[in-house]
């Protein structure tokens, strides 16, 4: 009887392990693809991404690090690019920045994030040299 129980348990363990592995492998692929919900979206799809999701996305964090290392007062490109997102005057104006300050580096970090988000909704990551 003990031997039969061991055999049944072995078969059950093998069956469960075999059933779980493909699911786990599939789940990790799905997780890897869905890791950044801001990528690969059309202009129509972008508004489905909340500001909070966007600002905390891997791509947003990468852009901030590359552009200004998170310094909201940063000025680069001989004064052409300003703030946390290194926005030029045209971008700042087009996406409502002038409602906050004359230039991005004069606005709060949160205001700069709002303007960058509006720009992302319209143009995706293209202004920062990243393809969707």
Image: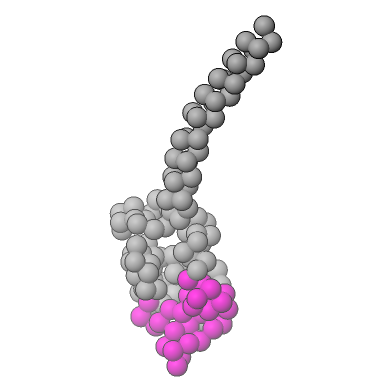
**Magenta residue check for 77:** yes
Residue 17 visible within the image: yes
**Magenta residue check for 85:** yes
Q: Residue furthest right?
A: 2
The percent position of residue 58, horizontal first and vertical second, equals 50, 61
The percent position of residue 14, horizontal first and vertical second, equals 54, 25
Q: Residue furthest bottom?
A: 78
Q: Work out whether residue 86 or residue 30 is closer to the camera in this orientation and state it.
A: 30
Task: Please tell me which residue is depicted at 34% across the width and 56% down the height of the picture.
Answer: 41
**Which residues are drawn in magenta?**
63-91
Task: Please tell me which residue is depicted at 55% across the width and 20% down the height of the picture.
Answer: 11
Task: Please tell me which residue is depicted at 31% across the width and 58% down the height of the picture.
Answer: 43
Q: Is residue 60 above or below residue 9?
A: below
Residue 111 visible within the image: no
Q: Work out whether residue 16 or residue 76 is closer to the camera in this orientation and state it.
A: 16
The image quarter in which residue 10 lies: top right
Q: Quadrant of the C terminus?
A: bottom left
Taking 2 as reference, is 71 left or right?
A: left
Q: Quadrant of the N terminus?
A: top right
The image quarter in which residue 46 lies: bottom left
């Amino acid at each position: 009887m003990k031997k039969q129980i061991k055999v049944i348990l072995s078969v059950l363990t093998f069956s469960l392990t075999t059933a779980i592995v493909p699911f786990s492998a599939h789940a990790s692929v799905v997780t890897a693809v869905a890791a950044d919900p801001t990528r690969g979206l059309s202009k129509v799809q972008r508004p489905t991404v909340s500001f909070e999701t966007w600002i905390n996305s891997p791509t947003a964090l990468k852009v901030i690090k590359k552009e200004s290392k998170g310094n909201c007062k940063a000025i680069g490109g001989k004064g052409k690019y300003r703030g946390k997102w290194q926005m030029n005057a045209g971008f700042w104006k087009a996406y409502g920045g002038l409602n906050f300050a004359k230039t991005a580096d004069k606005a709060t970090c949160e205001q700069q994030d709002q303007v960058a988000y509006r720009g992302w909704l319209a143009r995706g990551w293209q202004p920062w040299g990243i393809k969707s």
